[in-house]
Structures are given as structure tokens and as C-alpha cells.
Image (tube, rainbow, N blue to C red):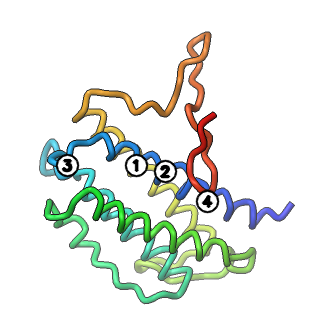
Amino acid sequence: MDLARAFLDQSRTYLRGDYLPKIERALDRLPEADLWWRPNDATNSAGTLVLHLAGNVRQWVVAGLGGAPDVRDRAAEFATTGGLSTDECLGRLRAAVADACAVLERMDADALVRSYAIQGHDVTGLQAVYHVVEHFGMHTGQILWIVKARTGEGLGFYAERPGGLAQLAWVPTPHGPLAP
């Protein structure tokens, strides 16, 4: 088994086949007027988090690991409090994830142990990929919470099994969710 390939493939699966579809499904249920809602000034809206994820993925994977120009404006991600639709925000995120997955597809074990300078940090490729996947998962959870808080509804990602055990209501794949 090629451990490097397995890690990179699983990273792509998390980004494209698990987290992104969850964000898409959640935002599909969120009224457009609530995309920029936040409970207070210390928090971010779902729209802000989507833009932030797109910027982070582009900076760390597409530019940092893939060699594309780093054009990220992190401050602008957090300063944006409206003016973009859900479709526009998701379009940016989908494009960033697709570009990142293309970079991850080209990487190998040597690229994972190589050193990179990303966002002022000296990291290995492994650290960069691990950071992006963890960061994406954390903010996915925040977006899902916002949608549940605003709609008062669950998102249907899990079904209850006998005995109170949760069962995935979909199976993550590298190309999106499949119904069980």
C-alpha cells in the first residue's frame, strides 16, 4: 500500500466528497437573507466562512503546494459582510476545492516531505495538507451550526439506528456523496 497516495486520496475525499457536499446541502436550506447573519461581532457568518475556506485552500494548497501565484486577501474574506449570493460564494469554494484536488492528485511522497513557505510558516507538504483538511472540517461544522440555528432543522446527514447509534445517511466518495 502506498501510504502517501492513501493520505492524499483521503484528503481529497474529505474536501470534495464529504465537507463540500455538506456545506452545499446546508446552504441550500439556508434562506439567502441569512447567508451573512451572525449572532455578534465576534463571530463569522456562513458567507464569510465560505469565502475564508476558499481563500485558505487556494493559499495553502493551490499556491503553497501547487506553485500558483498567491493572490489571497485574507482580510477581505473577513471584511465581506454581504453583496455576494450563496451561489457566488459556493462557486468560489467549488473552484478552490477542484483546483486543490488537482494539486493533491499530482503530489507524491516526496512532495509530502518537502518544505514549503506558506502564510509565513515553514511546513512540510504533509503539514500543509493536514492543516487544510482540519481547518476545512472545523469551519464546515461552524457553517452547519449556523444553518441549524437559523432554520431550526436538522440537516439529514445521519439516521438513527436501533439502539440509538448514528448511521451515515450518505457515503462520502472522492466525487461527492452517494445515497446508502
Q: Which residue is at a point 68% across and 61% down the rendered structure image?
A: 9
Q: Which residue is at a point 61% across and 82% down the rendered structure image?
A: 115
Looking at marks 3 and 1 on the same chain, the residue that comes earlier in the sequence is marked by 1
> Helix, strand or loop at disc 3?
helix
Horizontal and vertical percent position of residue 136: 45, 56
How far apart marks 3 and 4 lie (CA) works out to 30 Å
Residue identified by numbered label 4? 11
Horizontal and vertical percent position of residue 65: 56, 80
Residue identified by numbered label 3? 32
Residue identified by numbered label 1? 23
Q: Are marks 1 and 2 in contact (CB under 8 Å)?
A: yes
Q: Are marks 3 and 4 in contact (CB under 8 Å)?
A: no
* Amino acid type shown at disc 4: Ser
Looking at marks 3 and 4 on the same chain, the residue that comes earlier in the sequence is marked by 4
How far apart marks 2 and 3 lie (CA) works out to 20 Å
Give the quadrant of the N terminus: bottom right
Looking at marks 4 and 2 on the same chain, the residue that comes earlier in the sequence is marked by 4
How far apart marks 4 and 1 lie (CA) works out to 17 Å
- Which numbered mark, 2 or 3, is in the foreground of this view? 3
> Helix, strand or loop at disc 1?
helix
> Helix, strand or loop at disc 2?
helix
